[in-house]
Image (cartoon, coloured by chain):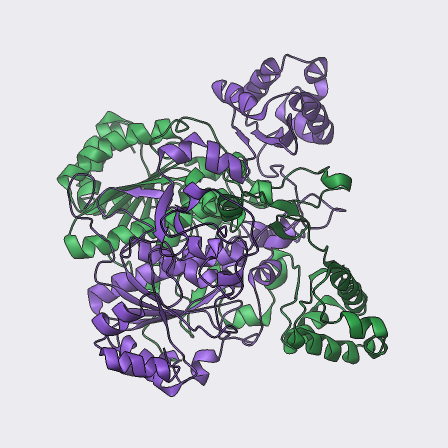
Chain colours: A purple, B green
Amino acid sequence: MGENGETKRWALAGVRIIDLTWLQVGPQATRILASFGAQVIRIEWRHPAAVDFLRYMQPFAPDHATPQGGRSQGAARTHGIRGNFNRGGYYNNTNPGKYGITLNLNHPKGRDLLRRMVRDANAICENFSPGQMDKWNLGYAELRKLNPRIIYMQTTGVGKFGIYENYVSYGPTAQAMSGLTFMSGLAEPHPPAGWGYSYLDHSPGYFGAMLMMAALHRQRQSGTGAYIDLSQTETGMMLTGTSMLEYQLTGKPTARYGNRMPYLNWSPHGAYPCQGEDNWIAISVQSDDQWRSLIEEIGSPQWALDAQFANAARRKANEDELDRQLASCTVLEDRYDLMMRLQARGIPAGVVQKAPDRFDRDPQLKARGYFVDLPHSEIGTWPIEGFPAELSRSPANVGGLTGRASPKLGEDNDYVYRELFGLTADELEALKQEDVI
Amino acid sequence: MKTQSSLGSSLNQTVLLEIGNELGDYAGMLLAGFGADVIKLEPRGGSQSRRVGPFADGNPERSIFFWRYNLNKKSAGLDLDEPAARPLFARMAARADIALLSGEIETVERRLELWRELAEQNPSLIVCTITPFGLSGPYRRLKSTDLTQMAMGGIMAVCGYDPGANLQYDTPPIAPAMWHAYHIAGEYAAIAILAAANFRDLSGEGQFIDVSVHEAVNTCTEIALPTYIYNGQVVLRQTARHAFPHITQFRLSKSRDDVYMLASLSPFEREARAFAELADQVGMEHVLKTPEYKQLEKEDSRAAYTYRNDLIEQLVARLPAQEVFERAQALGLAWSPIRRPEDNLADPHFNARHSFARIHHPEIGRDLLYPGTVAGDGEQPHMSYTRRAPGLGEHTCEVLEWSGCGRDEIEKLRALGVI
């Protein structure tokens, strides 16, 4: 029930998704679908070599965390508990709202069970290596025979079809290939700084959710299915902005600009040091008026009144010196105090927030309820990152249908196999004995 | 593989009215790629995003930025804030499916008042706003740009270069170029609008959607938040690799033709075998017989990583980047050159996949290739881009006729200066 006693209303009510994804890029998409009320059944296999890497990747929940506790018991460093796949913090953040079952697709009976599940599902998602599902005889062509309405989404580094079809890729590989890594960083001779994480495990996940939503909408309207061959590298290319067009028009190779703004007369435009260790503020001055306000706010130092900074064009032309001088002033300031003083004068300024700033301090994220506390059956209740938009009638809720953070490995075997797919307790037990479930 | 047609027409018959700036351009274009009829309602002088560079031929009427983010759309020129335009908006709202309002909160709030009234007349209307911090909360009136959003959303803190001695950073955090705060927010806006479209299929109801750029950026930093939430640790930014609680091994190498490569070896049997084969191919087989190699090829220690990275550096320096790439990939190593975006224009793989949309630009008398799709159905792209960004007011008459205005009414609006 919602706050006003209204029943929660899910945008994807009645949608069932068979989720064979793992790592980040695939589960990111199904996470979003689950948060709109799709019944996402996450299939994993419990053999240690097949378990999702995120289940045994840092950060882990602290060893002292119990089912009744969670973050209220405090954060702490740990290397995890050997052989325990249920304590991954990043896994927990990536897979809330999903049902978790085990299924051995290397076993013919496992594949039969999957076919049975696909018959009345709306969609199936996977991000195995490109040819894996075909090897199991579970590719789109096969599954479509069982269920002509099925939406099949496959996410790979460079796409399944084409010349590079067997190329292997992780987020960073796709980023390097797409041009995104090159574009990030200070001008030559500095090397590219790239991204400090797999951006192309996030964005293609957003596109995955988008493509699935478009396909589900069409399925609802016309009963049509779809095959979706989603490529991380192409997603990255989509995000390279105007660089490819500029190159075609001017022949000028793409360059790096650090934090500066090459396309508008905005200056100063960058990150400047503040008091404390590795503390920075981003300042983005868009006009001469803002520049004059900025000077006043930092006490009208002599250097700032120099003719070389008198207007936007001159500041742009002397940006190295401008950045050096401005940094010598900001370094004496408290970062949040300076941000709010500049904001009071209408200047876009924002602290370069680190995780503690965002989690403990950011009053906007708090007021908007960005972090959602959700229980996990073994490690207790932890804050999970939310959905960044409010919908008035069919809100997103990262706890989805389960009202829970991530599932333990195979946690929902009984519910899914018996209640959803009608297996008897004996059948289930036999399949466990045969190493199918 | 013959499939059931591209999703490029899945929003056919859906009309989206777009009013705003660069915070919303991309979201509108994404939905236009699924076939939505996106009508950009632009004020006198045109949208703010028409004034963002770079410009073709240095001509300020030819914003490449505007071209890139407004494919497939129509443009109608209207005075958006003129009271006399209200009846016209009412007609449009009655016929439209989605209204997308973006920009500074003051502007969006003012316009939203009208759209709340209009939505009462058309309860199936979906109204989505994209503002810097969302419509509520203590920061909602703060000013922002793409750069400051990348800062406050946590991306900058995890991107940049290795610290110097004593873990002191002498370079600033980096906001990866360019416009990614608006990319992320635009993608979430498109997702939320599609979710609302799915809800409308079930219920017939529209709704209001409030997208916050700040929150959107915050969702996109991988392990940064969980590492703090679970372990109380802060990840450190480092050159071209993952931010992590400690500094990991530097691993950029350069090819014979001076291209940076992303190449590394993990301590796995499979990768050791692949590397041995690669070393053999390029005349480095002598390395494989050394005692160091035998000891360090599969060890999971800092010394072993350093050793393997040195070998990779030597190997990569022997060949041009494309050749390293092809040889390594053929052996199952996930290595890649760090390409410039334009390097992909001639790549046969992406051309075979129709990754680029060829768009004709009569104003410069030529075609341009746009990276236009992220997915295909085995034959064609799922997001379909066929039309260049519109000129200001290019479709005003068509849009007014669609809204049901008669000729007399159009003349009256013209006389009032509304169009």
The N terminus of chain B is located in which quarter?
A: bottom left
The image quadrant that residue A412 belongs to is bottom left
Who is closer to the viewer here, B11 or B224? B224
Give percent across and percent down for residue B120. Answer: 15, 37
Specify whether A392 is left or right of B380: left
Residue in view at x 57 percent, y 74 percent: A164
Give percent across and percent down for residue B5. Answer: 33, 71
Residue B356 in view in this figure: no
Who is closer to the viewer here, A176 or B159? B159
Who is closer to the viewer here, B316 or B76? B316
Specify whether A183 is left or right of A15: right
The image quadrant that residue A368 belongs to is top left
The image quadrant that residue A122 belongs to is bottom left
Residue in view at x 63 percent, y 39 percent: B173
The C terminus of chain B is located in which quarter?
A: top left
Residue B328 in view in this figure: yes
User: Total of numbered circles in the picture?
Assistant: 0
Of all residues, the one furthest to the bottom in this rendering is A108
Give percent across and percent down for residue B375. Answer: 44, 65
Specify whether B89 is left or right of B351: left
The vertical placement of A9 against B121, above or below, is below
Give percent across and percent down for residue B281. Answer: 77, 80
